């Protein structure tokens, strides 16, 4: 089963994203690191196929997550999910290896489609319904 590590400071967002992705057939680990130093260990223990992270969080941000993930395993794609739309930030994220930037609110079908596009071809069930995540 394809594994996705979801990193977000909002427990509500982690729960919503987890539900969206699990409904589509992904195995999900949702988590909020207290420090950037924890990320390589979590990657080693969970062995995700993809990392989906919020951008703005206390103590870490999407850029630092992407950098830590690159150092731990450069083959794992990192996707940033954010409500922030700043061209300079987007350029920096892409420069440091972020494969895609998605914007909140996002619909379940758009989130699942983005994950499927970035992962090796696998049979993943279509989502049963479409919901929209709140801004955050």
Image (cartoon, grey):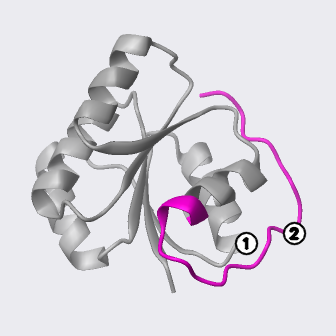
Return the residue found at the far right: 129
* Vertical comparison of 101 with 122: above or below: above
Mark 2 to mark 1 CA distance (whole Å): 7 Å
Stretch of the chain drawn in magenta = 116-136
Q: Determine whether the residue tagged by mark 1 lies in a helix, strand or loop.
A: helix
Image x and y of residue 11, in percent: 53, 47
Q: Earlier in the sequence, mark 2 or mark 1?
A: 1
For image coordinates 72% across by 40% down, the residue present is 133
* Vertical comparison of 75 with 45: above or below: above
Image x and y of residue 112, in percent: 66, 59
Asked whether disc 2 touches disc 1, contact meaning CB atoms under 8 Å apart, the reply is: yes
- Per the picture, the main secondary structure of the magenta-coloured stretch is loop
Q: Which residue is mark 1?
A: 23
* Mark 1 crowd level (few <14, some 14–19, many ≥20, 10 Å Cα): some
Asked if residue 101 lies in the magenta stretch, the reply is no
Snapshot quadrant of residue 61: top left
Q: Determine whether the residue tagged by mark 2 lies in a helix, strand or loop.
A: loop
Residue 128 is marked as 2
For image coordinates 70% across by 39% down, the residue present is 106
Asked if residue 123 lies in the magenta stretch, the reply is yes
Left or right of residue 112, residue 61 in this image: left
Q: Nearer the viewer, residue 61 or 127?
A: 127
Snapshot quadrant of residue 48: bottom left
Image x and y of residue 18, in percent: 60, 62
Q: Nearer the viewer, residue 114 or 10?
A: 114
């Amino acid at each position: 089963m394809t594994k996705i590590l979801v990193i977000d400071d909002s427990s509500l967002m982690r729960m919503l994203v987890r539900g969206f992705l699990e409904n589509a057939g992904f195995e999900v680990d949702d988590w909020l690191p207290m420090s950037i130093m924890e990320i390589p260990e979590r990657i080693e223990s969970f062995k995700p196929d993809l990392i989906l992270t919020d951008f703005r969080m206390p103590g870490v941000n999407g850029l630092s997550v992407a950098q830590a993930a690159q150092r731990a395993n450069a083959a794992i794609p990192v996707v940033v999910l954010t409500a922030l739309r700043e061209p300079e930030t987007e350029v920096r994220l892409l420069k440091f290896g972020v494969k895609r930037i998605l914007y909140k609110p996002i619909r379940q079908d758009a989130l699942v489609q983005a994950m499927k596009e970035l992962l090796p071809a696998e049979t993943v069930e279509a989502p049963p319904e479409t919901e929209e995540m709140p801004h955050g």
